[in-house]
Image: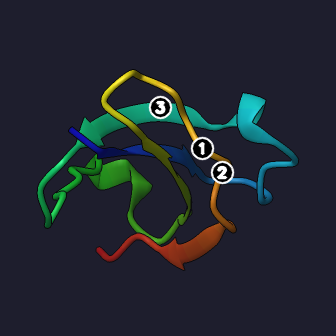
Amino acid sequence: MKRAVLFRKIGGPAPAGISELEEIAADSAAPYLSQFAEADAGKPAHWAIAWENSAGQRGPLSALSTWTIPG
């Protein structure tokens, strides 16, 4: 089964690479709903996705997407 592996960094400047991102989920169904701490409201959330095939092989990391956590 193909699935999306989601990576995230909360706050601070945009990450320079995958090592600065936290792997938070691997999901094969949409939508994915992420919970945020109340203290993170107003901070930037930096996201990237990599597709993974049924053999566990990951493709390249997507372009970074950044948006502000609502609060």
Label 2 and label 1: CA atoms lie apart by: 7 Å
Question: Mark 2 packing: few (<14 Cα in 10 Å), some, or many (20+)?
Answer: some
Q: Amino acid at mark 3?
A: Glu
Which residue is depicted at the point 38% across and 65% down? 41
**In the image, which disc is placed on residue 13?**
none
Residue 65, percent from left and from top: 60, 72
Whether 20 is drawn above or below 29: the answer is above
Above or below, 69 against 13 in this view is below
Q: Which residue is mark 3?
A: 23
Q: Which mark is residue 61?
A: 2
Residue at x 53%, y 64% (from the top left corner): 43
Q: Which residue is under mark 1?
A: 59
Secondary element at image label 1: loop
Amino acid carrying mark 2 in the image? Leu
> Mark 3 or mark 1, which is nearer the start of the sequence?
3
Tag 1: residue type?
Answer: Gly
In the image, 11 versus 56, the foreground residue is: 56
- Disc 1 packing (10 Å; few <14; some 14–19; many ≥20): few
Q: Position of residue 36 (x, y in %)?
A: 28, 51
The mark lying in front, picked from 3 and 2, is 2
Residue at the spot 29% in from the left edge and 45% down from the top edge: 3
**Pointers 3 and 2 in contact (CB under 8 A)?**
no
Q: Earlier in the sequence, mark 3 or mark 2?
A: 3
Count neighbours of disc 3 (C-alpha within 10 A) and say few if under 14, some if 14 to 19, many if 20 or more.
some
Toward the right, the furthest residue is 16
